[in-house]
């Protein structure tokens, strides 16, 4: 059934859905996990720090949110494959939503970036995004239909705007925007929607790595403040819902007007 045929409740809910959100122990990913779980989804998330993840898991359990966790460095191909194996067990082989959120920042003059810097940012931000989408495709395909099967990438306004010191990071974010459009075109016939959220400066640890850029955001953007993680999470949740069943291939800026 299309969203238009569903009840109000069915259109604005994620009840019965399963989701994978990468990088959910902190920041934007953490807020996305909570938002999806509060809307009724069963969520699995990962990061590299086992102790921090376990602490999150306990807090989510206390809030009666259905969230499972596992350690995974998404920059490593074998770990991504293991994550998908884990997912088949924890979510019963059903996946409705993939959110590629985990990202590596890198603030360095282009002339000073080493081969290792380049490889790390590429592997974490874009290679993982492409490969996890590939790995998730058969699972997403199984639950496709009714506009409920959905991939969301978290890119950045750095994928549109030039910032000094962000050359490699920006390349990966621009690539995520284009990957979104390509996969959306390729998978529309499979019933899988693919969209992207491009945040501006959001109040997280990554923002602390970029003090000058963040400072300029606060003065150059119409809303004159950083965004909060929940303000990104709510847009991601909307894109995953049946209410958004006719939206695919879009890159939506959540940036307080920075790119207007
Ligand atoms: P945070 O640093 O606050 O959180 C990042 C999360 O991802 C953590 O849970 C971290 O856990 C996890 N993570 C990082 N690297 C890996 C990895 N290799 N494998 C698995 N997990 C990983 O960052 P944000 O919440 O700010 O950023 C989230 C996304 O939003 C990123 O893609 C970022 O580029 C994007 N973004 C952020 C903006 C901002 O202003 N904050 C602006 C625009 C885009 P751990 O380190 O323990 O692995």
Image (cartoon, rainbow, N blue to C red):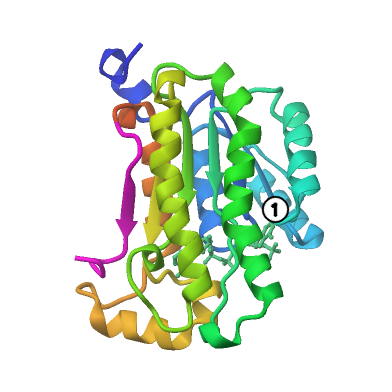
Front-lying residue, 215 or 37: 215
Q: Position of residue 145 (x, y in %)?
A: 44, 16
User: Would you say 141 lies left or right of 73 here?
Assistant: left
Q: Magenta segment: does it hold 251?
A: yes
Please rate how many residues cluster around mark 1, counting C-alpha atoms within 10 Å: few if below 14, some from 14 to 19, many from 20. many
Residue at mark 1: C-beta within 8 A of ligand 1: yes
Front-lying residue, 260 or 206: 260
Q: Magenta segment: does it hold 222?
A: no
Residue 55 image-quadrant placement: bottom right
Segment colored magenta? 247-260
Residue 93 image-quadrant placement: top right
Query: Which SS does the magenta portion mostly show?
Result: loop
Front-lying residue, 174 or 45: 174
For disc 1, the marked residue is 74
User: Would you say 221 lies left or right of 16 here?
Assistant: left
The residue lying at 61 percent from left, 81 percent from top is: 113
Please identify the quadrant where the C terminus is shown: bottom left
Please identify the quadrant where the N terminus is shown: top left
**Residue 18 visible to an observer of this rendering:** yes
**Residue 64 visible to an observer of this rendering:** no
Q: Position of residue 199 (x, y in %)?
A: 39, 61
Q: Position of residue 15 (x, y in %)?
A: 49, 26
The residue lying at 52 percent from left, 86 percent from top is: 109
Up-down relation of residue 194 to residue 54 (above or below): above
Q: Quadrant of ligand 1?
A: bottom right
Element assignment for label 1: loop
Q: Position of residue 12 (x, y in %)?
A: 35, 30
The residue lying at 51 percent from left, 32 percent from top is: 40
User: Would you say 67 lies left or right of 158 here?
Assistant: right
């Amino acid at each position: 059934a299309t969203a238009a045929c569903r009840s109000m409740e069915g259109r604005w809910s994620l009840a019965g859905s399963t989701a994978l959100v990468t990088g959910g122990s902190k920041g934007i990913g953490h807020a996305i996990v909570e938002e999806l779980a509060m809307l009724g989804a069963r969520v699995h998330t990962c990061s590299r720090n086992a102790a921090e993840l376990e602490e999150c898991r306990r807090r989510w359990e206390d809030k009666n949110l259905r969230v499972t966790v596992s350690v995974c460095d998404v920059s490593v191909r074998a770990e991504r494959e293991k994550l998908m194996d884990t997912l088949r067990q924890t979510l019963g082989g059903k996946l409705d939503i993939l959110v590629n959120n985990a990202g590596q920042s890198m603030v360095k003059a282009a002339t000073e970036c080493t081969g290792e810097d380049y490889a790390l940012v590429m592997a974490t931000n874009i290679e993982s995004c492409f490969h996890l989408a590939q790995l998730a495709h058969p699972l997403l395909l199984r639950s496709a239909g009714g506009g409920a099967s959905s991939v969301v990438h978290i890119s950045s306004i750095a994928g549109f705007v030039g910032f000094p010191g962000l050359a490699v990071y920006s390349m990966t974010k621009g690539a995520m925007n284009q990957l979104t459009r390509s996969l959306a075109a390729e998978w529309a016939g499979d019933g899988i929607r693919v969209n992207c959220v491009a945040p501006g400066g959001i109040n997280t640890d990554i923002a602390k790595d970029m003090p000058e850029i963040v400072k300029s955001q606060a003065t150059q953007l119409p809303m004159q403040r950083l965004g909060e993680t929940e303000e990104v999470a709510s847009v991601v949740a909307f894109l995953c819902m049946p209410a958004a069943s006719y939206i695919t291939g879009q890159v939506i800026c959540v940036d307080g007007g920075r790119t207007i």
